[in-house]
Amino acid sequence: MKRLWSRIALSFFILILTLVIVLWFFLTAIIKDAYTEMTRDHLVENGQMVSQLIATSNNFNDPEALQGLIQQFNQPIEMRYTVVDEEGVVLADSENDPSTMNNHINRPEIQAVIRNGSALGESVRYSTTEQINMMYVALPIIEQNETVGAIRTSLSLSVVDEALSRLWVSLSIVLGIMFLISGVASAMLARSIMRPIDNIMDATYRLREKDYSSRVNAPSKGEFGDLSLSINSLAASLQKQMKEIEENEQQLTSIISNMVSGVMLINEEGRVVLLNSAMERFLSQHKDNIVGQAYEKAGERFALSPHIKSVLENGLKVHEEVHSYFPEERVMDAHLAPYYGQGWQQKGVIVVLHDITNIKRLEKMRSDFVANVSHELKTPVTSVSGFSETLLSGEVTDEATKKQFLQIIYDESQRLNRLISDLLHLSKIEKKEMPLDLEVVDMTGLVHEVAKTLRNAVENKKTHLTLPEVSKKIYLQGDQDRIRQIILNLLGNAVNYTAEGGHVDISLKENINTVRLVVKDDGIGIPEESLPRIFERFYRVDKARARHSGGTGLGLAIVKHLIESHHGEIEIESREGEGTKITVTFPKDQNAD
């Protein structure tokens, strides 16, 4: 803005200087003309006066008397007077001897009066006699109504030039002062004009730098005041709009960032411009390594590249199920659609991935559960139906055989009852329809109590059972019946899946806030691939042996839910053929955060 101020001031200076120069030349021309006219009038007046004196004195024909008369005007008046006759002969001169002077008939002013009969003759030229520029004015000398000669008055133009020089100096000083005053005034005017403009430009510059709190605070009047009010109104509107935009952006960013679905935006050039944290997690890459890259790099994980290319080229939505197998298997429900800018011009592609891995897993588990339940129910039902039909046919007459068949029917019905009871029990636990009956539980005593109920199985298999010391009491808050069921199931599995003469160890470890129950055996163990599924319903590592043992396949699933209802955790470590170690961690206080 300083350059604009200087340009305005310079423009004023040039304009004023031009006006001063034009005025100077105009005034000097007028003054010169006026001064010249005044000098000519002065010469005419003096010439007329001398002409009248000559006419009244009757000395025209007496050269000596005429010379004496003319010489009287030499000193007081700086004009030169010359009298010539009608032939141009110089009769008298106020400064020189007439006899030495040339004939003046060829002088322009003399010719105008004597030969042309003009009432006035004038001329400006260089005088060879005086060797200076002179102004000459000639008037006729009339006697008896006839022109008998001419009186010429002359004046050196140096006098005029000196007077004009003094006048020009004075005029130059006056105009110079006027120029300086006008220049200072123009600079002040330019500065006063630029001050509100500077304030306005400063405010608009800050607005351009996204400082929307900027306002024009300097008071202004007139158009600048109206402009300041308009800019302040615009700044207030911009500030409000930007605040709304920032709030919307924050809301949108928060929504996108906290979405469990992955979102990725690809521009029309095929480069990634945005992705959220969920998409980073799905792609196993940080956004800094993806943003700005071609979509092929981002899409190779789930084979999205062909779908992205299709949307870019055809502008049609795509809905596909995509898979990834590294580092773990993931199933994604992919939605791809074009997004548009102004005028509905396609600007790129938006990709949304929903992780349906757990849904697919649950669907598979549900399918497996239905199949397992059907299979588990089918076996006892078939046995009961088959043996009952045989007995009803009357073909079996042997009492021992009948008793055997009835025993099988009873056993299978009991097994069916246990299966249904476990299913109902598990369903209630999952629906949290069985609230905990909290009390202080003696874990050491409870472990020994459960061990007594399994004494026959332990003795039959000659299992070496190691229990925690009775004297070392460990207590926690919990539902005693459910904890008993947990210990019974874990200890029963350890005994059942341990070879005859094997070892089963149960230990309790107390920390500040937790109690750990550890059940360890040296039995058949669990294959590594089966460990992730060991807590699934009806899942059995050795199905034949598990069914023979009377298990329903729901025990560990129930145990896990009972532990979780106590806010506890269960961990399992096992090697096939070496044994299994199960660790259950309970909090001492169920009301603790």
Image: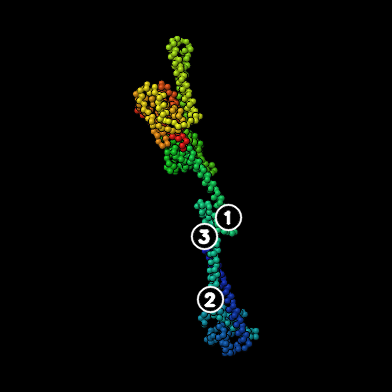
Q: Tell me the quarter of the picture where residue 324 sits.
A: top left
Q: CA distance from mark 1 to mark 3?
A: 23 Å
Residue 436 position within the rendered picture, expressed as x and y whole percent measured from the top left:
48, 31
Measured as percent of width and height from the top left, residue 481 is found at 46, 28
Lateral position of residue 400 relative to residue 19, left or right: left
- The residue shown at (57%, 59%) is 220
Judging depth in this view, the residue of 551 and 10 nearest the camera is 551
Q: Quadrant of residue 463?
A: top left
Q: Label 1 sits on what residue type?
A: Leu
- Whether residue 459 is situated above or below residue 232 in the rendered picture: above
Check if mark 2's residue and mark 3's residue have beta carbons within 8 Å.
Answer: no
Look at mark 2 in the image and give the residue it sits on.
165
Q: Which is nearer the N-term, disc 1 or disc 2?
A: 2
Disc 1 crowd, CA 10 A, few/some/many (<14, 14-19, 20+): some
Question: Residue at image x 57%, y 74%?
Answer: 31
Where disc 2 sits, the SS reads: helix
Residue 4, which numbered label?
3
Mark earlier in primary sequence (1, 3):
3
The crowding category of the residue bearing disc 3, from other C-alpha atoms within 10 Å (few below 14, some 14 to 19, many at least 20), is few
* Front position among marks 1 and 3: 1
Q: Which label is found at residue 229?
A: 1
Front residue of this view, candidates 320 and 50: 320
Which mark, by number, is residue 237? none
Q: Position of residue 298 (x, y in %)?
A: 44, 39
Residue 169 visible in rendering: yes
Q: Secondary structure at mark 3?
A: helix
Q: Earlier in the sequence, mark 2 or mark 3?
A: 3
User: The disc labelled 2 sits on which kind of residue?
Assistant: Ser
Q: Which amino acid, by three-letter code, is at mark 3?
A: Leu
Say which of 139 and 253 sits in front.
253
Query: Which residue is rendered at x = 58% and y = 76% of the image?
Result: 35
In the rendered structure, are the residues bearing label 1 and label 3 in contact, judged by CB atoms less than 8 Å apart?
no
